[in-house]
Image (tube, rainbow, N blue to C red):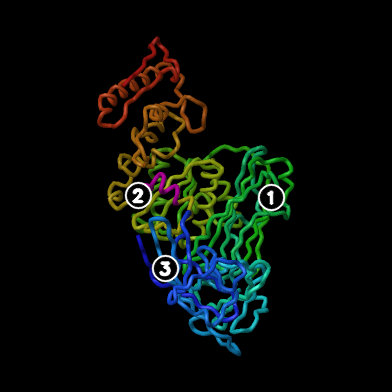
Amino acid sequence: MYCSFAVHYYVAKEGEALIVACPLYPQAGFQIDWYVTQTNESIPAREGERRYSSRDMLKFLPTLVEDAENYTCIQQSNNSRESALVNVKIYPKQAGCVTPNDLIYRFPNELSTIYCPNLDTYNNSGDIQWFQNCKPLRDAKYFSRKDFLLIIGATEADSGNYTCHFVHNEKGTIYPVTATVEFKFKERRTSLHPKIKIPPNNAVEKVKLGAPVAISCSACFGTGPQEIAILKWLVDDTIIHSFKDSRFHEYPEEMLSASNQLSCMNNTLKITRVEDNDFSSEFQCVAINQHGWTAHYITLKKKESYGKIYDAYVVYPRNDKISTDGANSMEYFVHKILPDVLESKCGYNLCIYGRDLLPGEDAASAVEMSIHKSRRQMIILDHQVMHCEEFAYEQELALHSAMIQNDSKVIVIEMEGAGDYSGLRESLRHIIKRQGTIKWKEDHVADKRSLNSKFWKQIRCQMPLRKTFGGLHCNQSWINPGAQKPHTSKNLGQLLMHTGGGENEFHMPSHPLVKWFLWFSFDLMLSSLNKKRKHLGFSLIVDTKALPEIALGIPSHHVGS
């Protein structure tokens, strides 16, 4: 079998090292030979020769003008043969700052970073030196790192040709190598002094001794892609990775950025176990870019025990002026419809900013405390979401309470016309992907306060169970439309009857007549549901050993499928 490929081109200056790669993919057990194409002259594989082959590489140490030729590399075994053609062009040395057009690499420039081409092909044994239009770069705005040059605060004046100089070390002999890259400045972003959004400076994080804790830090660095953006945690002025076998770990997230939006980064500090000395330590979140640095300081305080007093904290994008005009407006929904249904009809206790919490000096701490005192975090999304700073702050606290501290659960409501959520935090997008959203649509308006509507059934399924029996009818539904899968008999049984002492559970009334009535009604209900279980997609199995003893001599039952 014989195969041939298109021509590959190499250009270089006279007197430099040049290493040419065979375009064929090298295979084990195959022999690779090099030839001068026109004369069919075999190129020896002897090290020390000025021009010699080294398997899939052809080396010129150094180049001469007469090396400009077409070369063929042939890879063959007993029953197959492949070849490829390589064209080499050598430019003679020229006086002054002259770079032939063929020797200039043109790449799309991302940000203000210029890469030195083909560096990995050579055995570089020294530092790379950079030149702009043949002049060495000495200004502090240029940073040379490994194989690239970074220009800090680039402007139109920085456009031009940049040449990297390095050396190739061949068995102790040094040969120069140069490569020239064209850079064209394009304004794609703005960079600002870093601003930390959360946590507030000098914040106090209340934690439990011996428990794990996670503290999120979020900072913004400007708009669009950023050249330098660093977000780090320090403990007593020591960076996290300096601790060996540490209880401290940081988890940075990838920066979210777009050409016309803020570029922000999040980094979470996780402490696997809080110890006594942590309460005297100083924790710093530090944001750094080319404009400088910003640090926020956090201390830990032993957490005071308190109970949950709210069933849900409502997180919503709000306007400065609360309006009740329009049945579908955010303010009308939050301040009128939600309280009318969930509080007046269902007996829940909501915490709503603007009603229970008023703007003031201590608003931030009041919001944080109220979120911690809520069993659910009700996040409402609409088209204003991406432009509301208060919503972003409260959302951070709510997600921190639900996902990291595991202190509550999240309910996501989507208003009509909410739009795309690609710019939301990754953790909120994960919740939406996992459990979906409960959608408030125009068809809810006609009967918006009916507890039998699909919307309110889904809301009540995700709200906490009421402690009193009177709240049972309002809070429970046999099937949760918002869940990913139907209830199994096990978790449905747990939904129907809780007998423990948790704060989200109700207790059987103690009077024996009430017990008998409840059991009788419960038994009839289960029998009816079991007759329809094929249509419902589940069967009910309730072990009455887990239920309270029934008075008046009513025997225990076992209801099976």
Label 1 crowd (10 A; few <14 / some 14-19 / many >=20): some
Amino acid type shown at disc 3: Ala
What residue sits right under mark 2 in the picture?
Answer: 439
Seen at 45% across and 54% down, the residue is: 316
Q: Position of residue 348 (x, y in %)?
A: 44, 39
Seen at 45% across and 22% down, the residue is: 509
Q: Earlier in the sequence, mark 3 or mark 1?
A: 3
Assign a secondary structure to mark 1.
strand
Say the numbered circle drawn on residue 505: none
The one nearer the camera, 14 or 71, is: 71
Overall secondary structure of the magenta section: helix
Q: Is residue 132 above or below residue 239?
A: below
Assign a secondary structure to mark 3.
strand
The one nearer the camera, 394 or 72, is: 72
The one nearer the camera, 402 or 516, is: 402
What residue sits right under mark 1 in the picture?
Answer: 299
Q: Position of residue 330 (x, y in %)?
A: 40, 56
Q: How many marks?
A: 3
The one nearer the camera, 402 or 465, is: 402
Q: Position of residue 30 (x, y in %)?
A: 46, 57
Label 3 crowd (10 A; few <14 / some 14-19 / many >=20): some
Q: Are marks 3 and 1 in contact (CB under 8 Å)?
A: no
Which of the image's four quarters has the C terminus? top left
Between the residue at mark 3 and the residue at mark 1, the CA separation in whole angstroms equals 66 Å
Q: Is residue 299 above or below residue 112?
A: above
532 left or right of 306 in image: left
Amino acid type shown at disc 2: Lys
113 left or right of 387 in image: right
What residue sits right under mark 3 in the picture?
Answer: 84
